[in-house]
Amino acid sequence: MSSPPEALSPADRHKLRTGLDRMWHAAGFSMAGLRAGWAETAFRQEVLAACVLVPLSFWLGRTWVETTLLAGSVLIVMIVELLNTGIETAIDRIGPEWHDLSKRAKDMGSAAVLLSLVLCGGIWVAALYQRFAA
C-alpha cells in the first residue's frame, strides 16, 4: 500500500511523477550526476580520452560490431568510474574514520575500474593488432 503524498519526505516526492515529467526530471538527475563526476580528475581524464577514442573507433572498426566494441569499452570505463565515485562518496558520507569494511568497498570499486581499463585496453590492442599487424 503506498503512502499518501503528504506522508512522503521531500526527497521521495519525485517518485510520484509519471510519464514525460518523470523522464524529464530523471534526465536532470543524470546530468547532475555527470556534473558531479566531472569534479573527479579520473573521470575528466577518461572523458578526454573518450573524445579521442570514440571517433577513432569509427575509423578503426571495420564492422559495426568492432566499432561498437571499441566505443562501448571506452564508455564502460566511464560508467564504472562513475559507480566507483558513487561508492566512495557514500562511504565518505558515513564518516571519515578508517574502517576495514569501508576500505574494502573502496578497494573493490577501484578494482572494478582497473578491470574495465584492462578490458578496454585489451579490446583496443586486439583491434590495432588486427588492423596493422595481421
Image (cartoon, rainbow, N blue to C red):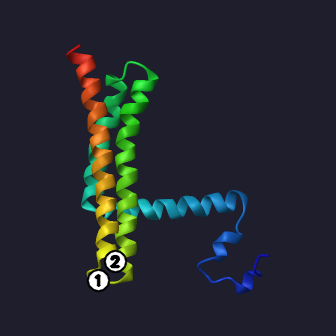
Q: Amino acid at mark 1?
A: Pro
The image shows a total of numbered marks equal to 2
Q: Is residue 26 above or below residue 103?
A: above
Q: Amino acid at mark 2?
A: Asp
Q: Is residue 117 left or right of residue 13?
A: left
Quadrant the N terminus occupies: bottom right
> What number is the disc on residue 13?
none
Q: Secondary structure at mark 1?
A: loop
**Residue underneath mark 1:** 96
Q: Secondary structure at mark 2?
A: helix
**Residue underneath mark 2:** 92
- Residue at the extreme top: 134
Q: Residues within 10 Å of mark 2 (few under 14, many from 20)?
A: some
Residue 15 sits in which quadrant?
bottom right
- Place of residue 80 in the rendered image (x, y in percent of width and height, measured from the top left): 38, 53
- Residue at the extreme right: 1
Q: Residues within 10 Å of mark 1 (few under 14, many from 20)?
A: few
Residue 24 sits in which quadrant?
bottom right
Mark 1–mark 2 CB contact (< 8 Å): yes
**Which residue appears at 28% of the width and 45% of the height?**
117
**Which residue appears at 30% of the width and 36% of the height?**
53
